[in-house]
Amino acid sequence: MPLSVVVQITVSGALMGLVYALIAYGFQLTYATSKSLNFGQGELVMVSAFVSLTLLGTGLPYALVVPLGILFGAGLGMLVERVAVRLALQQKSEGWILLTIIVGLFLLSFAENVFGRDDRPFPTPIPSDPIHIFGVDVTWVDISVAVGVLTIMALVEVFKRRTLLGKAFEAVSADRDAAELMGISATRTVTLSYALSGAVAAVAGILVSPITTVGPTMAAALVLKAFSVAVVAGLESGFGVVLVGLILGALEGLASLYIGSGWRETPGLILLILALAVRPTGLFGKAIIRKV
Amino acid sequence: MLTVTDLHAGYGLSEVLVGTSLEVKPGTIVALIGANGAGKTTAMRAISGTLSPTRGEVRLGGSRVDGLGAARIARLGLAHAPEGRKVFGPLSTEDNLLLGAFRWLPHFFGFHRDAKQALARVYDLFPRLAERRTQLAGTLSGGEQQMLAIGRALMARPKIMLLDEPSMGLAPVIVQEVFRTIRRLKAEGMTMLLVEQFASAALGVADHVYVMERGRVAVSGTPDDLRRDPRVLAAYLG
Amino acid sequence: MLKRLILVRGAEIALFVVLGALPLAVDSPYVLGLLTLLAIYGVVLIGLDVTVGYLGQVNLAQVAMMGLGAYLAGIAATRYGVGIPLAALLSGLLCTAVGALLALPALRLEGPQFALATLSFTALCATALNELEWLTNGAQGLSITRPPLLGHALDARDFFWLCTAILALVWLAMRNLLSSQWGRAFEALRDSPIATDAMGVGTYRHKVAGFAFGSGLGGVAGALYAFNFGYLQPQTFVYELTVILLLGVVLGGRKSLWGAVVGAVLVALLPNLLSNHVLFRAFSGIAFALALVAGARALLRRQADAFRALAPIAATLTLVVGSFLASNTEDWRKAIFALLLFSVVVGLPQGLMGFASAALARLFRVAPPELPPPALLDAVLPARAPDGSVLLQLDALSCHFGGVRAVDGVDLTVKAGAIHGLIGPNGSGKSTLVNVVSGLYAPTSGELRLRGAPLPRGKPVAAAKAGIARTFQNLQLFGGMTALENVMVALRGAWRLPLPLVLLGLGRIEELRGRAGALALLELVGLRGEARTRATDLTYGSQRFLEIARALARRPELLILDEPAAGLAKPDVHRLLEIIRRVKERGITTVLIEHHMDVVSELCETVTVLDGGKVIAEGTPAQIKRDAKVITAYLGAAEPDAAGAGQEIDRC
């Protein structure tokens, strides 16, 4: 296998890994306020992408479709919160695991029937002719993915660390009742975090669709890998997901090159189980101190 | 300032409060004492909205607030320093205090400009918190956490402050310091409702005292009245 | 007693008799096929219920276990001529082993991480089954021949009876398992994993065993599945089937063998339900009507909030509307399962059996079996002669968390048979010290020895086995269990029967002896009359005493009482003093953390005072009360509070 091919595959894989990292980042946003996450996040990415595709099909310009798609994603995120998460949080149970799985399954079926079961190409104004950097072919689309992912994450990190609302996120997670006593509505904070997570998912969908095409199977494919990234990096690791995402994406590309395309998913899945065995809170996660 | 009439509240099927009524006049400290299980903390929770009352009325400054939910009641001017302090462990002391002023700050850019004055006042009252402003709240000692909880409540510039068992889990020496602070706040005109198991200390600062027993107010009067009451003496001050 | 036997066992026997007799009454291969599927799914769901119902986790791997079991049995029979019993056994064993291997990492964290690990495992298996074409024939599918059983070729009816027999065996084994210490352990680890470990019952080990066992059952069912259809495809064992299985367990009812069978009925019938329009419309209509009634009832009685009452109505209404609008219900399969499962999870979380058993319990009041007389206290808690030797020795013990020195170089000696007090302000390190000794935290440095031997560090189960028992400052009772069961869980050395024998139902004698022993301990703390009361329903004082009885069940070398008087009213404080004195009479060494100075003065011969993680004074109660350092740090110039400052109570 010529080195240039290996490097090419590795870089392409790593770029996809950034998308997984972005979706994993969406998990962290909701985990930060409520220690919950949306098991149907992949479906959120997919439906937002389909809706954006449909909007593009009606002739609206790309520059308008992107924010609309993001808004839709935020709305969908809020719907997930209202329907699948709020009840379980009120009962202080983990019923949201099952409920978000259910909502995701429903959205999948909905998408299959309304948008069709075929994969469709996603038009983008960004040129897709490759440019040569350090002997590797990357397209502007690939670069837009990298830029988009890193920008969104940076924005959200600033929000979390510098603004009081971001600190309120952490407060609600630390002690919901006490936060309420400060006048911070825990429910509204959680809703906001799900809206943000949905918006991030929509961005991921819009960024990745030109490369992978849009289709119902995109959900499952993306989300398992995003889960692996999230768990391996740690659900509270912030930027750690970027590093893990890059590595995982690269490993996937190499696996499909050397072992066979059917085994693409395997590195992520094995890494997930290994990570849980060795360091359950994630590579960059914080240790838990039991309080008695 | 605060009027509670015939309040009923409980957890699940069991009703803990069975008709509690009390009143807190502006600028005074009212103490709520009683044994464990009498319903003191449940009363606080029902007033501040953490718990929804099943019957009865709570009026803050004349308008009804029962059933509105803790966050809304907090925004209407009621600050509650809860039982067990409940500071936000993973956040710094200063962040904890700033969050206390949450309702006053523009939500998106919670910059310190607006809150600086309130923060300065809290640091003046509790110099030890100023020393530890960047320290994580979870690593503070019990007494410091109690100071933080009170400071956090003050940041909200409340009309009335509810203090739930401030002496709990604290060494007697620290308890004295806490009550010195309470006296100082009273001198500055703060209205307070204080729940305490440490009856003698509560009587030392209060203007009016209610004794709770089995979910309702059993005895009501000034601290002197209560000190002369043989039942109270035997049960709580002996 | 007889009434109970007839009602409960009778119903079970009736179930299997009816099931077995049906093919004789109804001669239809279609019905027979459904019944066989029912039996197979029954086994799957019983296995799934172990994790979902008893351990309370979302397990998405049962489908993979079915697949693994199916393919192993199929390949073994077709290529190597292995017979049915051996094939099923192999599948069961393989999946138990695989389950254990998966559980070891996956169960280290619960909740979402566990669900994700099982999901990943299922995806991995699907990939493996698809890609390893030389073994499994991949996506083309594998044909399987059903081998004869003991030389006798099995026709459809014989095979059905085999499946039913296996279901009956699994049912019996599970029942025996759940009414043994295993069942108690599962319940305990849900209520309080910390206390479960502290009582020497390994939480992790039981979770792993439970998951492995449930997976093994999935494997056995998979083998039967393979022999039923004679043809296997990797596409069968995918995510969608996982959701159907979960639907079965939740709709049937969690933590219930009957629930698993009821759920299996639904799972077996589902495909037929979907393909037949009329049937599906009728089904949706019934579901909608039920949701409407249940929701209206809940709203009128103010039992549930608006969402819980209305959401299932909305979901089932969508089903009804969809059943009329959609031309092809097959295309909307996933949405249909999703809506059904949603309605059940939100509207009927206890499942059909949960609902039915509440109703049945009201109809037939069955008295619980009588309690045996309590054992002799000496049998359960032998008295020792206090010899004044050194029992617990701590040397330069330190425990740092990040920058905080919670315990900073503490030396402590506790003599055998003594009651040793440990006091100090909050944050002085008392709780941390005690948590280190009981194995909850590992110390940063220093020595800890029990009777000269080093104590296990950072391992609560090992520390419990070494002889440390404790109560907790914030109660950690097993709330859902009775007082008797709380103590039974902790009984040291009472549960020796190996698992296979438990499954066979040979644990009765152990159970009776355990009950008698636990009763003796309840009598010691004055709770014999409350043996059958649920722990959450006890009064606060009784709950505190129950924790002590539970700790004593460990027959400890060292008993640690962490603020036992916290929040107790005066009469209960007297009872507490009584109990601790009785414990001392038996020669058991006690370390007592308290803020109640009068309790400390009454009971303790020696008191150690901590402040800021260091020992600042040690001596008799009288001595330390006069000590200047202690007064400054802890007692204060004013009179020490008689009501007790520093009580962590959670309700008022």
Image (cartoon, rainbow, N blue to C red):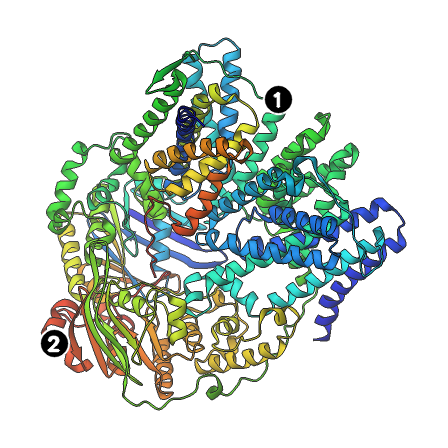
Q: Quadrant of the C terminus of chain C?
A: bottom left
Residue in front for this viewpoint, A56 or C160: C160
Specify few, some or many for label 1: CA neighbours under 10 Å numbering under 14, 14-19, or 20 or more: some
Image location (x, y in percent) of residue A88: 49, 45
Residue at 38% of width from left, 80% of height from top?
Answer: C575
Q: Is A224 left or right of C294, judged from the image as shown?
A: left
| Residue underneath mark 1 | A116
Vertical position of residue A81 compared to residue A118: above or below: below
Q: Looking at the image, is C297 positioned above or below residue C647?
A: above
Can you give x and y, in whole percent of width and height, for residue C179 in the image? 61, 68
| Quarter assignment of residue C163 | bottom right
Q: Which residue is mark 2?
A: C627
Residue C521 located left or right of residue B217: right
Letter of the chain that mark 2 sits on in the rendering:
C
* Quadrant that contains the N terminus of chain C: bottom right
Q: Residue visible at 13% across and 57% down?
A: B180
Q: CA distance from mark 2 to mark 1?
A: 82 Å
